[in-house]
């Protein structure tokens, strides 16, 4: 519903709509700047009212909405200074994804809302580069934040039986807050896997730092590192002394082959993770193989029945 425009007094529009929105727009008009900011709890009613005025905005992105939905449902949406912006004519200028998430989840959010911004300012939003999960980790003084963020995303999306794709991991519905929270909870095992095996000369040379780091995280989540580390020692070592038929010999050849210009899928971190996990399964079962079949499906992780090991408690 549009604001009912009433009389004009000295060039100032007086809004006659009897609603909370009209009252706030009038309050903005009374300010010297013509703008007014307020911390509000935006519920479904308010979100719906603001979305009614969402005209000529960019299209909604499903992946962005899904990430915000997860943060809201998991109580990770914070009052961080970001604003929802409403023009002096009552049009929504910025905040459509956040408001859509309120409508979809039914959960209110607390946020700053600015009223009275000139309509022509719509084209000035989002001009800077959005901060990535890696940027946020770097702000917390996490070294090699790009590789760590990629490892965490691989770790979070892994599920046996899911298809390996070459989609950008940023579109996998893993929010930046989830990346940060995962790092905080698993900092020790992440750093151990990264420094000991992922960020080695071999890992960097094969462009498989994130895949190796993630594979160690996933396997050592289920098995003691005393069982897991020997596999990664051989995988990331100098390659000497690996006997014929050892699946690790095939994995090293496969990872090297990928560098020679294979498909986009095979060069992805997801595919390299599949290679390492299927190699682990063959190695832990002491199978002698010359080749492993890649079906682009993540496998169950096999191993001796030691019971699940809590990542936080691993040394």
Image: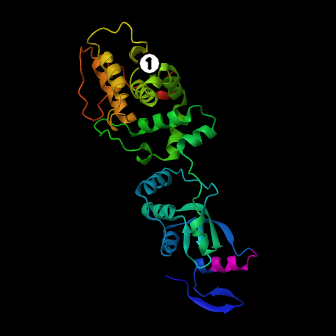
In the image, is residue 57 above or below residue 134? below
Residue 68 in the image, given as x and y percentages of width and height: 48, 54
Residue at horizontal 42 percent and vertical 43 percent from the top: 169
Asked whether residue 48 is drawn in magenta, I would say: no
Counting every numbered tag in the picture gives 1
Asked whether residue 31 is drawn in magenta, I would say: yes
Q: Residue furthest right?
A: 32
- According to the image, label 1 marks what residue? 225
Toward the viewer: 306 or 264? 264
> Label 1: few (<14), some or many (≥20) within 10 Å?
some
What scheme was used to colour the molecule? Answer: rainbow
Q: Quadrant of residue 288?
A: top left
Residue at horizontal 51 percent and vertical 41 percent from the top: 179
Toward the viewer: 128 or 60? 128
Please give left or right for residue 201 compared with residue 164 in the image. Answer: right
Residue 139 in the image, given as x and y percentages of width and height: 63, 40
Please give left or right for residue 126 compared with residue 235 in the image. Answer: right
Toward the viewer: 152 or 253? 253
Residue 207 in the image, given as x and y percentages of width and height: 44, 28
Residue span colored magenta: 23-32
- The answer to whether residue 305 is visible is no
Residue 229 in the image, given as x and y percentages of width and height: 43, 16
In the image, is residue 221 above or below residue 94? above
């Amino acid at each position: 519903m549009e604001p009912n425009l009433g009389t004009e007094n000295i060039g100032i529009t007086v809004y006659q709509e009897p609603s909370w929105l009209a009252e706030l727009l009038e309050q903005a008009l009374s300010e010297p700047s013509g703008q007014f900011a307020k911390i509000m709890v935006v519920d479904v009613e308010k979100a719906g009212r603001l979305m009614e005025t969402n005209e000529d905005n960019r299209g909604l992105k499903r992946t962005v909405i899904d990430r915000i939905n997860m943060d809201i449902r998991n109580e990770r949406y914070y009052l961080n200074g970001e604003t929802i912006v409403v023009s002096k004519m009552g049009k929504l200028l910025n905040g459509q994804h956040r408001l859509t998430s309120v409508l979809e989840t039914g959960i209110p959010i607390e946020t700053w809302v600015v009223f009275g911004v000139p309509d022509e300012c719509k084209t000035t939003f989002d001009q800077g580069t959005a901060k990535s999960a890696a940027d946020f980790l770097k702000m917390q003084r996490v070294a090699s934040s790009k590789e760590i963020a990629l490892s965490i995303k691989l770790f979070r999306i892994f599920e046996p039986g899911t298809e390996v794709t070459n989609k950008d991991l940023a579109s996998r519905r893993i929010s930046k807050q989830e990346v940060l929270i995962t790092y905080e909870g698993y900092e020790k095992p992440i750093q151990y896997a990264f420094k000991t095996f992922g960020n080695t000369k071999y890992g960097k040379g094969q462009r498989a730092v994130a895949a190796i780091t993630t594979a160690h995280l996933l396997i050592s989540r289920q098995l003691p590192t005393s069982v897991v580390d020997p596999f990664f020692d051989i995988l990331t070592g100098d390659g000497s002394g690996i006997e014929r038929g050892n699946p690790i010999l095939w994995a090293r050849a496969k990872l090297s082959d990928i560098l020679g210009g294979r498909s986009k899928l095979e060069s992805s971190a997801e595919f390299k993770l599949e290679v390492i996990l299927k190699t682990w399964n063959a190695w832990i079962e002491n199978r002698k193989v010359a080749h492993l079949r890649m079906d682009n499906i993540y496998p169950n992780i096999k191993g001796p029945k030691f019971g699940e090991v809590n990542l936080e408690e691993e040394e």
